[in-house]
Image: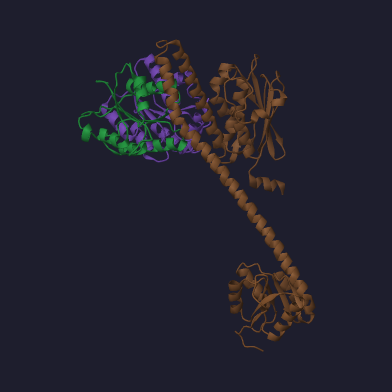
Chain colours: A green, B brown, C purple
Amino acid sequence: MKTAPELLIVDDNPADVVLAREALAGSAHHCQINSVGDGVEALAFLNRTGDYATRVRPDLVMLDLNLPKKDGLTVLAAVKADPDLRRIPVVIFSTSQLGRDITRCYKMGANCYISKPGNLHDYFSAVKSIEEFWFGFASLPEQGE
Amino acid sequence: MSSAGTKLEVQDSTQSKAKLQVLLVEDNLADAELMLRELRRDGFDIATTVVQTRAEFRRRIKEEFPDIILADYNLGDWRGVEALEILHGEALDIPVIMVTGALGDVTAVECIKQGAMDYVLKDGLARLPEAIRRALREKHERSLRHQAEQDLARKVDELARSNADLEQFAYVASHDLQEPLRMVVAYTQLLSERYKGKLDENADKFLGYASEGAQRMQVLIRDLLAFSRVGRQEAVSGSVDCNAVMAEVLQSLASTVEESGAVVTHGALPDVWADRTQVAQVLQNLIQNAIKFRSKEALVVSVQAEKAAQNWLFSIRDNGIGIAPEYAESIFVVFQRLHARDEYAGNGMGLAICKKIVERYGGRIWVESQAGSGSTFKFTLPAHGPEERVAEQA
Amino acid sequence: MNPNEVDILLVDDSQDDIDLTLHALRAENLASSIFVARDGEEALDFLFCSGAHAQRSFDRPPKLVLLDLKLPKVDGMQVLKRVKGDARTKIIPVVLMTSSKEEQDLVIGYNLGANSYIQKPVDFDEFRKAVKLLGLYWLVVNQPPLATGKLKAAKQGQ
């Protein structure tokens, strides 16, 4: 990573976003965390429209499934259908453990699927693993201007 | 003689519900009158309609729903026995008595076969009243039985629906409760960690209790969810290879088995007819219990199966702490625990779930044990699916 | 090994890299069953249940495919394109594991639907660490699709 990696968290539960930020505070990769609370905002952010015109494209998206306005699957489908956005890895981070939800996400092109754990320790561990893997080991395409 | 298409209506005194509604299928009005006289003489209070043609018959049975039909065999261009077919076609259960001139035995039997209750010869009309009474009695009994069957079916239906509602409720409640609970657990834990020793010492204790309570609730709800899932339609029965399932369960429990130093062995396991995931759940719960309730001795668990009529009987034997016989049944009850919370973790759902699953397939589960000398948990599952079971019994 | 119970499909033509990868995975006890294909054609036969692997079933895919780009017969990108282009196989997680540093390959790979892209470390130790992290992430942290997902959920209930 040349510059600090950019992470977009899409989650309608502010408490979960705070937890993710807590988990990543002090991370060696100094990733910049942005968050939005619904599917419409998520797509506006990614397409850099309206209030988000000056934003940078994120290097990684952590996407919850239960979102107001447009749900996670809709956002996922839109991202993976867009020639400019589809290269951004999307990690589904959701409480659902239903087999069919998981399969559907993979069908739509989700890069991976991680269940939100129920306790603090495992939650932190999951978020840190995600950050460590994608920003520390995986190679990501440049998101350019 | 009358011409086709006319009808004769005879009303005795005033119309009332108590009147016997009689439909006469007869083309000879004089004969009709004779029959009616016989009935009145015997004390019947009747309201009568006479029809002669098929069309008329068809119309009348649908409009008036008579209590009983008296039909002649020879009706000019049709036969009385056709009336039986028509009734059958309209799915109407009205008793029919053939009242006819000389009939060969063969024809008489034919009429009975076609559904007539009885036949009475026109020169033996004295028999008619009793024949009618008997036909009506039988019809009444049939109605009662039909009603009882319908009531039962309706009750079974209500019960099934009520059960489904309850399970749906349990599922939705446990499912929806998980999310806010996750918040309580995560944040009490975060508070605990972040402010440990920074507030007064009571704060640490209070946070500890809150955190523990929330986590216990989480496990409880997860188990409730598992319990309520057992009855839901998600399960798909089929032939399950228990050797493969056992291998998966052991891999799933690999770290727990290793930590405890337990040795889990199994004989050749059969195929059973059930849902694969649920079979895995039963085996997993029982083995986990054996590991949890082990004694100071190195734990040895052995899983065997033997054929028992149409089922397979599984035995899971361990050399753990055992269970006093007086508790052998209550351990399968939901939330029933035998030990204090600080002695052994868990909330008593595991065995209740096993029981629910096994019983779903018509099996039984029980334990043979003594305190201090290990336990053998046994359960049965069907060897074959329903079709093969029927074939075997045939 | 049961061809229908493979955890990882490793596609690589370098024996050294294969040995290293297998060693690292086994040391961490991450996968009980790993199948090695040494060229793109065999990888395709395996995943599409054809040729020498006709007895395989589409219902039991591997939980993870580690795919090198430079392969004989059919190259990695072609394999990726076919796997991600077919409804029967597109949900299988495919991680490109290659020595290529080309930005071009990165973009094309992700655009074709690669789940992730790892540059093979040159250093022996780093390589092992990378494989370990890879395995942990994709087999333990991640929830793979299909039937394998169910039993995992049960395990988390402990």
Q: Residue at x 42, y 26 (%)?
A: B183
Does B143 sit above or below residue B66? Answer: above
Q: Nearer the viewer, residue C50 or B18?
A: B18
Q: Nearer the viewer, residue B296 or C19?
A: B296
Q: Residue furthest bottom?
A: B1
x and y, in percent, of residue C55 in the image: 51, 38
What is the quadrant of the N terminus of chain B in the image?
bottom right
x and y, in percent, of residue B331 in the image: 65, 28
Q: Is residue C35 left or right of residue B137?
A: left
Q: Is residue A100 left or right of residue C78?
A: right
Q: Is residue C56 visible?
A: no
x and y, in percent, of residue A129 in the image: 39, 22
Q: Residue at x 50, y 20 (%)?
A: B212
Q: Is residue B160 left or right of residue A32?
A: right
x and y, in percent, of residue C34 in the image: 47, 26
Q: Is residue C154 left or right of residue A142?
A: right
Does A133 sit above or below residue B27? Answer: above
Which image quadrant is residue C22 in?
top left
Does B153 sit above or below residue B62? Answer: above
Which image quadrant is residue B237 in?
top right
Q: Is residue B249 visible?
A: yes
